[in-house]
Every structure is written in structure tokens, then in C-alpha cells.
Image (spheres, rainbow, N blue to C red):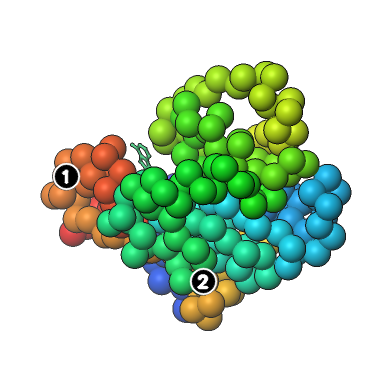
Amino acid sequence: MVSHDALTEIPDGLDLDLAAVAYDPLTTAHVSLHGVGGLGTWPDTGVDAVGDEVVLVTGAAGGVGSMVVQLALRAGARVIALVSSDERTALVPKGAEVVSMQDSARASELAASPVATLLVDTVGGARLAERLAWVRPGGRVAVVGYTAGTSATLDLPNWLLGDVAVLPVNLLRRAGEGDAVVDELTALLVAGELAVTLETFAMSEVEGALSLLGAGQVRGKAVLHPSA
Ligand SMILES: NC(=O)c1ccc[n+]([C@@H]2O[C@H](COP(=O)([O-])OP(=O)(O)OC[C@H]3O[C@@H](n4cnc5c(N)ncnc54)[C@H](OP(=O)(O)O)[C@@H]3O)[C@@H](O)[C@H]2O)c1
């Protein structure tokens, strides 16, 4: 017996694998950009239109990151997508400037002359503190996750000088914001206007799938097929 509250109707035409993984990236990316990041409406950056926003995204090959790339581009922002290595660049949706952290020259350039007005950070970790300096003064960082580590240390004098707001993204508290947009975003997914990359695994492959997940090597979201 399953409670009615635990069930979700899957829209016609939505692939079951996608249905299993899409809710999180769709809602988290939207809330990060709009509810938290105030895309196009953030007063301190001196921009008053989405077209003037430069959105920097870490973990841009991941579930949330790649959706942030797509939604920010659809909204009309310029997008710079960061990935950890050259081999992850192909997983980033088209339309963004993709920067591999192995390209130290471009990474140094981005740090030396910050162009981003909004950073959506899906990886966290100690290097989050460095990335604050990649955002223009008056800009903001929406912190989503911590796959690269659970802590970061702020150097208060430099943080005050940098003048960048650090904002938490909490989808538990903001679930209503996600629920309000999920049907509209799912329709775009069904129409093929948004995409969530996923890799499927049979139950017999679960051990390997978990190792790949732990090493950050799954291509997109991982879906396990219980009956396979
Ligand atoms: N705050 C909230 O309310 C909320 C809501 C939803 C999700 N989240 C969190 O947001 C984060 C991103 O979610 P997601 O679905 O996008 O995850 P994901 O698809 O598994 O991974 C995102 C990116 O993180 C990097 N990564 C993965 N494993 C790593 C590791 N072991 N060490 C360092 N980097 C690693 C990878 O970057 P590269 O591809 O560049 O290597 C990957 O593309 C997760 O921590 C998730 O728990 C938070």
C-alpha cells in the first residue's frame, strides 16, 4: 500500500528515466538563478536586465549545473561554465563558454579580471573562497552543493573588499518555489527544449555505478534499473 501523497503523476511523453532524475536539477537550477540569485533583478551589480548578467556555473557538467547553464541561456544571460577537466567539457550544454580548470591560463584570467555578476556554485569545498574573487563587486554567489568538500574559509578583509554576497540555496525551505515552476519546466523537457543527461545502470552493476558516482565520473545523473 502506497500513500497517495507519495505518488507523482508523470506527464505524457516524459521518459521514465528522466522522470526519476529531472525534478531536482529543474527546480534547484531555477530557484538558484531566480529565487536566490535574483537574475536580472539584483540591484548591487549595476545591471538592470538579464542580458547584462554574466552567470558563472561550477559543476556545469553535473545535473544541477548543466540545467543552470540551460536556464540562464534561455533567460538571455551570458554563461561561463566551469568543469573540473578537459574530458568533462563535452557534457556541458551548447551555448556557454566552457572553461576546464585544467586550462590554468583562462582560469587565471577569470580570477584577475572578474566578469561574472552571479556565480552558481554546485561543488563548494575549500576553493569556493577563491571563486568569490571571480565575481564582480556587488555580485552574488548562490551556493548549492558541496561535492568538492564541506567547508570553505573566508578571509574577511578580502571578502569585505570583494563585496560579493554569499547566499544559501535551500530547496527544502524553498520547495514551494520549485513546485510552482516544475510543470512548466517539465513541459520544456518533454518538448526537447531542455535536457538532463543521464546514464543508466542495471542492478547487477550497482557496485560499479557507486564507484563512478563517488569518483565524479558518471555522465550526468545515474539511474538504476531495479528489474534489469
Ligand atoms: N542546496 C540544495 O537545496 C540542493 C538541491 C539539489 C542538489 N543539491 C546538491 O548540489 C550538488 C550538485 O548536485 P548535482 O545533481 O548537480 O550533482 P552531480 O551531477 O553528481 O555533480 C555535480 C558536479 O560536481 C562535481 N563532482 C562530482 N563528484 C565530485 C567529487 N567527488 N569531487 C569533486 N567534484 C565532484 C562534478 O564536476 P565535473 O563534472 O566538473 O567533474 C559534477 O559534474 C550536490 O552536492 C547535491 O547534493 C543541493
The mark found on residue 208 in the picture is 1
Q: Residue at x 69, y 50 (%)?
A: 117
Q: Residue at x 63, y 71 (%)?
A: 74
How packed mark 1 is, by other alpha carbons closer than 10 Å (few <14, some 14-19, many 20 or more), is few
For discs 1 and 2, the disc positioned in front in the rendered view: 2
Label 1 beta carbon less than 8 Å to ligand 1: no
Task: Name the quadrant where ligand 1 sits.
Answer: top left
Looking at the picture, how far across and down is residue 29, in whole percent?
Answer: 59, 54
Looking at the picture, how far across and down is residue 104, in whole percent?
Answer: 39, 46
Q: Residue at x 74, y 25 (%)?
A: 160
Q: Does residue 57 lie above or below 195 as drawn? A: above
Local SS, label 2: loop
Q: Which of the two residues, 131 or 201, is positioned nearer the viewer here?
A: 131
How packed mark 2 is, by other alpha carbons closer than 10 Å (few <14, some 14-19, many 20 or more), is some
Q: Earlier in the sequence, mark 1 or mark 2?
A: 2
How much space separates mark 1 and mark 2, taking CA atoms? 32 Å
Looking at the picture, how far across and down is residue 190, in whole percent?
Answer: 51, 76
Label 2 beta carbon less than 8 Å to ligand 1: no
Q: Is residue 14 visible?
A: yes
The type of residue carrying mark 1 is Gly
Q: Which of the two residues, 224 or 126, is positioned nearer the viewer here?
A: 126
The type of residue carrying mark 2 is Gly
Give residue 26's quadrant in the image: bottom right
Looking at the picture, how far across and down is residue 38, in whole percent?
Answer: 76, 51
Q: Does residue 214 lie above or below 3 as drawn? A: above
Q: Which of the two residues, 170 or 162, is positioned nearer the viewer here?
A: 162
Give residue 221's quadrant in the image: bottom left
Quarter of the figure that contains the C terminus? bottom left
In this picture, residue 52 sits left or right of residue 110: right
Local SS, label 1: helix
